[in-house]
Image (cartoon, grey):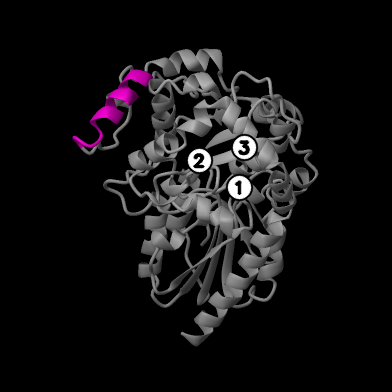
């Protein structure tokens, strides 16, 4: 029995789909030859309790099981890098593989590097691109920000919404270091009306490496109290995604109507991605926005996100930005490295703007690449799926 099906197709079960889902047509095309030999499911991981309920009750009839899962697998729980090895849904998927040793599982996922969290001989991983591939048609026709205001008083931007731990650390460090004065920073402090702890050490459960982190710790503690004031001054709007066309998660309209004026005044972006600490990560519209905005990108996503964007063919401006943070595993150290090693870019407005002028042609090249990045993801997905099917047949 398969629980909680909202609707079905003739080919496979569809439990739920996110708004502005551009992955669906490719999945339908790939599944055409497997409906007779596989149990196939397509689902959105939001809300995660519904996904977990499904995984706890689903029963399989065919030897091949294919899951297409959109979005994160963290069950909306912060990944503790010091103690966790898997996100909660990853743990449940691994259990499914162990509970059904006679089945072969294929997981289509929005996450990069999911193989670092799921390592089962009968479970195969096919990444199909994160939220960056959503709203494909809208983003492909989106006008980029190619004209900048060189008289802007703040030259970098850092946009933050949900109160994830790595965003709290990043903002506290920028504020405590005195770097916030050089950038436009937004933050949604009480997103759900929750009372935020007054002290940084009560809010964050991350583990400092003493005495190596002593100075950094003091900077964070000094910066954290200013977050509430920052939120009042530059508060994110909880309803921004529904403001223009009434659509959930309308990131393209948000870029065009709300973010464009801010991007015209910025030259550097600290990208606060949705996932950061876990081994696998979701590349979202936040990264795409930085490239459409023609900003120098400092990417605070999962470890390896910078290399991933290089792999897609994008120029990440290694001659301007020190991206050595990308290979740093410790979450604290990755944030400190990203900010400390790029201080000149963040606080020297004249230098940052001069570098932007020098790289104008490269920004234009990136615009061509980002508008065609969907083809790169589709090609990789199809190629990986073919390899997985070959391996399954040979096993």
Q: For numbered disc 1, what is the local secondary structure?
A: helix
- Residue found farthest to the bottom: 394
Can you identify the residue that label 1 sits on? 131
- Magenta segment range? 210-224
Residue positioned 59% across, 53% down in the render: 15
Does the rendering let one see residue 249?
no
Residue positioned 44% across, 32% down in the render: 167
The residue lying toward the viewer, choosing from 111 and 150, is 150
* Percent x, y of residue 13: 62, 60
With respect to residue 361, does 64 lie above or below?
below
The residue lying toward the viewer, choosing from 200 and 313, is 313
Q: Is residue 104 left or right of residue 19?
A: left
Q: For numbered disc 3, what is the local secondary structure?
A: helix
Magenta span dominant secondary structure: helix
Magenta stretch holds residue 215: yes
Q: Quadrant of residue 93?
A: bottom left
The residue lying toward the viewer, choosing from 13 and 192, is 192
Q: Which one is earlier in the sequence, the residue at label 2 or at label 3?
A: 2
Q: Quadrant of residue 244?
A: top right
Can you identify the residue that label 2 sits on? 274
Q: Which one is earlier in the sequence, the residue at label 2 or at label 1?
A: 1
Q: Which mark is residue 300?
A: none
- The alpha-carbon separation of the residues under discs 2 and 1 comes to 10 Å
Q: For the residues labelled 2 and 3, say whether their Cβ atoms are less than 8 Å apart.
A: no
- The alpha-carbon separation of the residues under discs 1 and 3 comes to 30 Å
Disc 1 packing (10 Å; few <14; some 14–19; many ≥20): many
With respect to residue 34, does 44 lie above or below?
above
* Percent x, y of residue 325: 42, 46
Can you identify the residue that label 3 sits on? 355
Q: Quadrant of residue 386?
A: bottom right
* Percent x, y of residue 108: 55, 62
Q: For the residues labelled 2 and 1, say whether their Cβ atoms are less than 8 Å apart.
A: yes
């Amino acid at each position: 029995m398969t629980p909680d099906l909202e609707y079905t197709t003739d080919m496979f079960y569809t439990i739920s789909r996110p708004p502005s889902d551009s992955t669906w047509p490719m999945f339908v095309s790939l599944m055409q030859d497997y409906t007779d030999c596989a149990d196939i499911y397509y689902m959105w991981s939001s809300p995660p309790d519904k996904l977990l309920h499904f995984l706890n009750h689903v029963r399989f009839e065919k030897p091949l099981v294919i899951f297409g899962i959109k979005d994160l697998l963290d069950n909306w729980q912060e990944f503790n890098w010091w103690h966790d090895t898997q996100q909660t849904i990853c743990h449940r998927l691994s259990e499914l593989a162990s509970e059904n040793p006679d089945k072969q599982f294929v997981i289509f996922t929005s996450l990069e590097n999911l193989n670092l969290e799921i390592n089962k001989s009968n479970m195969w991983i096919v990444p199909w691109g994160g939220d960056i591939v959503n709203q494909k048609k809208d983003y492909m026709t989106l006008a980029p920000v190619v004209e900048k205001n060189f008289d802007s008083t703040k030259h970098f931007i850092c946009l933050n919404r949900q109160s994830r731990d790595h965003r709290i650390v990043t903002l506290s460090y920028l504020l405590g270091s005195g770097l916030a004065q050089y950038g436009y920073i937004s933050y949604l402090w009480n997103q759900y009306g929750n009372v935020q702890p007054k002290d940084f050490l009560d809010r964050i459960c991350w583990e400092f490496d003493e005495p190596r982190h002593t100075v950094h710790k003091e900077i964070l503690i000094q910066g954290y109290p200013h977050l509430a004031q920052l939120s009042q001054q530059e508060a994110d709007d909880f309803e921004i995604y529904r403001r223009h066309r009434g659509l959930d998660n309308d990131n393209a309209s948000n870029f065009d109507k709300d973010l464009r004026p801010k991007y015209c005044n910025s030259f550097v972006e600290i990208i606060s991605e949705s996932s950061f600490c876990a081994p696998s990560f979701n590349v979202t519209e936040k990264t795409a926005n930085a490239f459409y905005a023609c900003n120098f990108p400092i990417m605070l996503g999962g470890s390896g996100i910078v290399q991933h964007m290089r792999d897609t063919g994008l120029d990440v401006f290694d001659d301007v930005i020190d991206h050595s943070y990308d290979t740093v595993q410790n979450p604290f150290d990755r944030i400190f490295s990203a900010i400390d090693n790029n201080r000149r870019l963040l606080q020297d407005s004249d230098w940052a703007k001069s570098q932007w002028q020098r790289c104008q042609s490269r920004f234009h090249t990136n615009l061509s690449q980002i508008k065609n990045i969907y083809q790169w993801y589709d090609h990789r997905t199809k190629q990986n799926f073919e390899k997985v099917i070959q391996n399954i047949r040979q096993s």
